[in-house]
Image (cartoon, grey):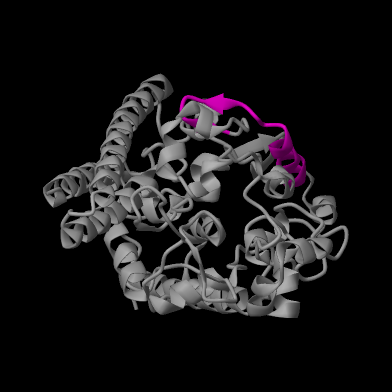
Amino acid sequence: MNRSKMIPIILSVIIIILAGAVVLLLIFMKNQPVETRGVPALIEIAAMEPDSEQWGVNFPNQYSTLLLTESNNARTAYGGSEPVQKLEVDPRLVTLFAGYGFSKDYKEDRGHMNALTDVRGTARVNETTPGTCYSCKSSSNPMLWAEMGMAEYDKTLFSELGARIEEPIGCANCHEAETMRLIVTNPALEEALKAQGKDWTSFTRQEMRSVVCANCHVEYYFKGEGKYLTFPWAGGTSIEAIEAYYDNYEFTDWTHPDSGTQMVKMQHPDYELFTAGSTHFNAGVACADCHMPYTRDGSVKFSSHDVHSPLLNPATACGACHTDVGYVTSQVTIIQDKVAATMYAAEDAIIDAIAAIQSADANSRSDGALIEEARALHRSAQLRWDFIAAENSMGFHNPEEALRILASATDLARQAQLKAVQALP
């Protein structure tokens, strides 16, 4: 056989041998045990260990930055972590929440390490407050939920449950101790995802960098006499789906003393607003990318656990994706100013509706059916306004959706006002 015929044969044999070697290498790699840490652990962390300081032995950078949340009380234009009294910043809130605890005390939330101090110090807590109010305040919760079950936990009085809760928000709220993977720890979140046919264990790590925030940063309510923590997500997470859920359940948090309307108080639906088709969510950005950006300690890259507004460190938080950070922050200001102006207009409209309903109700000859229609519109309007007001980004998590919801709130409030005027004899 001549040389020219031998070369293709030799090359074919070499390719077959190399291909076989690659296959064997891949089989070998696939059968190796999964590495759960980049470096060996210095100490073993017990499952659901509530003391974050112990986790900090293995992960000092993450723990040292978590500690910064106790003192990161800087304020931004529309939020931040300074414990200002919102009722003083916007006195209209006193009227909007009349007859409810939020008309007495409504302070800005502080960083994670202040969670226990702040919930125990609020004037909204009294002798009848259920233990459910601790649900998003402590790294002791996963262990207590596993031990007690969430139903028993929730129906225990706040004052009694507090004796078993010592740690603020920490590592156990988001991480599995053995593997450090991000996990769902709040039973209410797991139940809400299941109601939508979703299995969080199938989510990617990038998806989980937002989902773990939904352990707490969501709309929720206390269901039934046992005050069982529940997310109203069975029909979806849009404001319309949430309203329909509450209407079907005939749920109410309180009755407004001026209008007589049965009201729902929104909590902090950051996750719902962000995931409702926002630009950043659609681009695959996670909550942690902006609020817990990657940083370096020498050659070590880690996610900062000093959770706060990206506006306080835009070069790091925004600069990973945007080259012109100054332009980005200026756009944030423009967006938030527009949302704030629209939100305040909605507040004015709702307050006008409350006054009109109160006036009509005071007249014994008013049309009762029209007054009830006005109350239903008031409930719908305030629920929408509060969905944005209670959310922590002044609409920036999803500007288009925020403005849509606020415009709807204003429209419904003016309809309520008109119905009340029409009810007068």
Where are the magenta residues, as a range?
A: 61-80
Between 121 and 174, the residue placed more toward the observer is 121
Between 111 and 292, the residue placed more toward the observer is 111
Say whether residue 315 is left or right of residue 173.
Answer: left
Between 274 and 20, the residue placed more toward the observer is 274
The answer to whether 74 is drawn above or below residue 120 in the figure is above
Whole-percent x, y for residue 182 in the image: 60, 62
Whole-percent x, y for residue 292 in the image: 58, 42
Between 27 and 152, the residue placed more toward the observer is 152
Q: Is residue 299 visible?
A: no
Q: Is residue 268 magenta?
A: no
The answer to whether 375 is drawn above or below residue 35 in the figure is above
Task: Please tell me which residue is depicted at 48% across the width and 64% down the height of the picture.
Answer: 204
Please, which residue is most extreme toward the right here? 43
The answer to whether 71 is drawn above or below residue 226 in the figure is above
Task: Please tell me which residue is depicted at 65% across the width and 71% down the height of the picture.
Answer: 154
Q: Is residue 82 visible?
A: yes
Whole-percent x, y for residue 199 in the image: 46, 76
Q: Quadrant of the N terminus?
A: bottom left
Say whether residue 109 is left or right of residue 94.
Answer: right
Say whether residue 286 is left or right of residue 49.
Answer: left
The quarter of the picture where residue 198 lies is bottom left
Task: Please tell me which residue is depicted at 88% across the width and 61% down the height of the picture.
Answer: 43
Task: Please tell me which residue is depicted at 47% across the width and 38% down the height of the picture.
Answer: 94
Q: Is residue 74 magenta?
A: yes
Please, which residue is most extreme toward the front here? 364
The answer to whether 175 is drawn above or below residue 19 in the figure is above
